[in-house]
Image: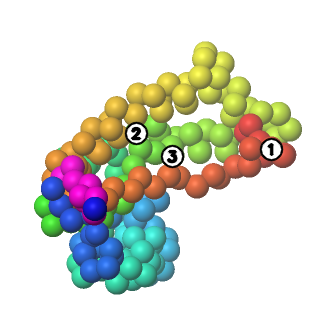
Amino acid sequence: MARPAAADPAGADPGHGKLGVPEHYVALGDSYTAGPGIPNQTPESGGCRRSDHNYPHLVAAALGVSEFDDVSCGSATTAHMTSPQPLPGGLTNGPQLDALAPDVDLVTLGIGGNDIGFGEIILTCAGHSVLLPVTAPCRHHYTRHGDELGARIDATAPKVAAVLAAIRARAPAARILVVGYPVILPAAGPAAGR
């Protein structure tokens, strides 16, 4: 006797298009997704500085999706998923979640670094490392009153969870992939702890 197919919680075909390949892919995120500085910058992205060789474009090409929307934007925070993002030159990137619709079957999300102050952390650590190159000045700076970075991450987690819930509400059949950030400094060795 054949077993009945498992019901998809969203009521959609879990196969995602032809032969399991997604048909409509939307990329959301900040500069790690957008790829500023990676040739070639797309003219329509304006101040968001999206590259036509960022990972979403490469994924879309590899999968051969029918429809692709990359709305990622440099300096985006979780707030810019649902609110407009002001850009240099008086431009605005609309709320990124506005790119979602019920027919979207793949979403990638890379967000949260700007919420924790990633740029400020890099500048602070670089400055301290120049002044005290053989110690762990960055670690000392961010742990002298407790785990400041851990607290920032903990405060950002509910914001990312809210974004994920909003994605699910707007694209109920989508497979949602959360993309992490690359490791910039090694866990051990001369640069560790800076």
x, y percent for residue 95: 19, 54
Dividing the picture into quadrants, the one containing residue 123 is: top right
Residue 153 in view: yes
The residue located at (54%, 28%) in the rendering is 150
x, y percent for residue 8: 23, 54
Mark 3: secondary structure: helix
Q: Which residue is mark 2?
A: 115
The residue located at (21%, 49%) in the rendering is 9
Tell me the mark number nearer the camera, choosing from 1 and 3: 1
Tell me the mark number nearer the camera, choosing from 2 and 1: 1
* Residue bounds of the magenta highlight: 2-10
Nearer-the-camera pick, 89 or 67 = 67
Mark 2: secondary structure: loop
The residue located at (77%, 33%) in the rendering is 136
Give the distance between the C-alpha atoms of the residues marked 1 and 3, in whole angstroms.
22 Å
Numbered tag placed on residue 119 in the rendering: 3
x, y percent for residue 156: 40, 34
**Mark earlier in primary sequence (2, 1):** 2
Q: Which residue is mark 1?
A: 188
The residue located at (25%, 75%) in the rendering is 17
Name the outermost residue toward the front. Answer: 1
Nearer-the-camera pick, 94 or 182 = 182
Mark 1: secondary structure: loop
